[in-house]
Amino acid sequence: MAVYDASQLEKMKETFTIGIIGLGDMGRLYANVISKAGWKVNACDTPDKTEELKKEFAPTSICIMDDGFAVSRASDYIIYSVEAEKIDAVVGKYGPATKMGAIVGGQTSCKTPEIAAFEKYLPEDVQIISCHSLHGPAVNPKSQPLIIIRHRASDEAFAVVNYMFQCFGSSLAYLSAGEHDRITADTQAVTHAAFLTMGAAWHSNQQYPWEINRWCGGIENIKMNLSLRIYSSKWHVYAGLAILNPYARKQIKQYAASVTDLYKLAVTGRNEEFERRVRAAGIAVFGEHRDHNYSGLLLSDDLLDQYSISNVPNDKTVPNSHLSILAIVDSWAKLGIKPQKQMICSTPLFRLWVGVAEYIFRQPEMLDRAIKVMLRQSDFCSDDLEFVIAARSWSDCVENGDFDTYKKRFLKTKEYFRPRFEESRVVCNAMISKLMENLHK
């Protein structure tokens, strides 16, 4: 028997207030979506931004409050939307002021430190239901995965929070904090590492890939657009997931190892061992595909070719070794990850990256070409070496838990690519929208 019926839940909008501590990009998205659905919303950011935020949100029904103390005292469900590495400090400051019997959750990408902070600082009468939208603030939440984590909560509290989250139009999934961190590591950690590495390697070589025929057309459009999308975002989003997620370090380390191992096999002439390892990884991840039927692929030639920011015509492109893609499939195989089984909790970036890997590994002629370029053509050798160095550098940074170095490396490359962010954002959003259409046909 349901705790509340639909009419009772709808009526709760009149008295049940949502509080949001942190009005960064995702905090704003949450505040706007929830408010437009008819819920009362209290929100705040750091005190120095209060007056500016009051002016900005004056045309809306969102109530901007002075600080997290005010939000905590006046709200029935408080969502902490702050950087993952700051969650302990922020909850430690405002958590003890939580309204008696209220519900608290967090919107960070890493739940292990978040739940630890809640258990450490929240009064025992406070209930805990966390969440995580698996997409960025520029992506329409409709049909995207939204994870709900019921850590300690009554049936009544869970019913209200679950009903509220339906206003996003997202695909709701229910996990524990540990399950969440393992799956987000599976679907995001190595994906982010690959694109961060691409950007760092291009930067080290002082290359703008859209100006060079090595990275133009088809798959290269995906690589460029997604790499620029990550670097146009905020560094702490990726640093928090990589460094604080207990499962992510192992995966990023394996990706760097796969990149290094494959490169060493290629440059030392161990061709048979290289080819055997690459093909075995493809079979382990995607299975045997000998029927040449590609109708089930996530991506198509048309989708790959139409979203370009390149200045070079497609007919001037040259074959690529695709070390980044060969290595990600090798790392998935080593880690026992089946990416197709993770789609329910995946990000748009992960879906596109799985699509790219599948596009190469399930089409024998494309995989043959990538292997041939890696083993027999020296054109990409220096570029692949920079990729190896960048992959190992990111892995070392994560392994050492070094937020400062992570930030400096990220921001330096961000500045290098900044002039093309706006164009790539428009193209990438269109590409993701098209992918989502294909997935829901």
Image (tube, rainbow, N blue to C red):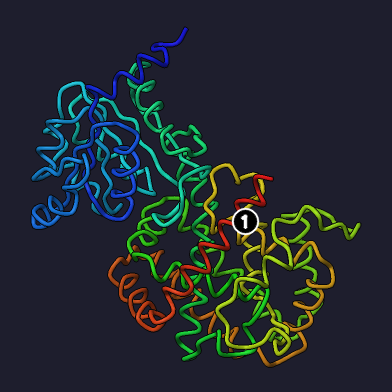
The residue depicted at 38 percent of the width and 38 percent of the height is 131
Q: Residues within 10 Å of mark 1 (few under 14, many from 20)?
A: some
Left-right relation of 360 to 226: right
Left-right relation of 154 to 430: left
Residue situated in front as seen by the camera: 364 or 419: 419
Q: Position of residue 359 (x, y in %)?
A: 73, 64
Residue situated in front as seen by the camera: 145 or 98: 145
Q: To which residue does mark 1 refer?
A: 435
Looking at the rendered structure, the number of numbered marks drawn on it comes to 1
Image quadrant where residue 406 sits = bottom left
In the current view of this chain or complex, which residue is farthest to the top?
A: 1
Left-right relation of 277 to 131: right
The residue depicted at 30 percent of the width and 36 percent of the height is 105
In the current view of this chain or complex, which residue is farthest to the right?
A: 291
Vertical position of residue 19 compared to residue 384: above or below:
above
Q: Amino acid at mark 1?
A: Leu
Q: Position of residue 244 (x, y in %)?
A: 36, 54
The residue depicted at 21 percent of the width and 39 percent of the height is 61
In the current view of this chain or complex, which residue is farthest to the front?
A: 59
Image quadrant where residue 65 sits = top left
Q: Quadrant of the C terminus?
A: top right
Mark 1 element type: helix
Q: Position of residue 439 (x, y in %)?
A: 65, 48
Vertical position of residue 270 compared to residue 350: above or below:
below
Q: Position of residue 438 (x, y in %)?
A: 67, 52
Image quadrant where residue 349 sits = bottom right
Residue situated in front as seen by the camera: 154 or 431: 431
Vertical position of residue 209 compared to residue 308: above or below:
below
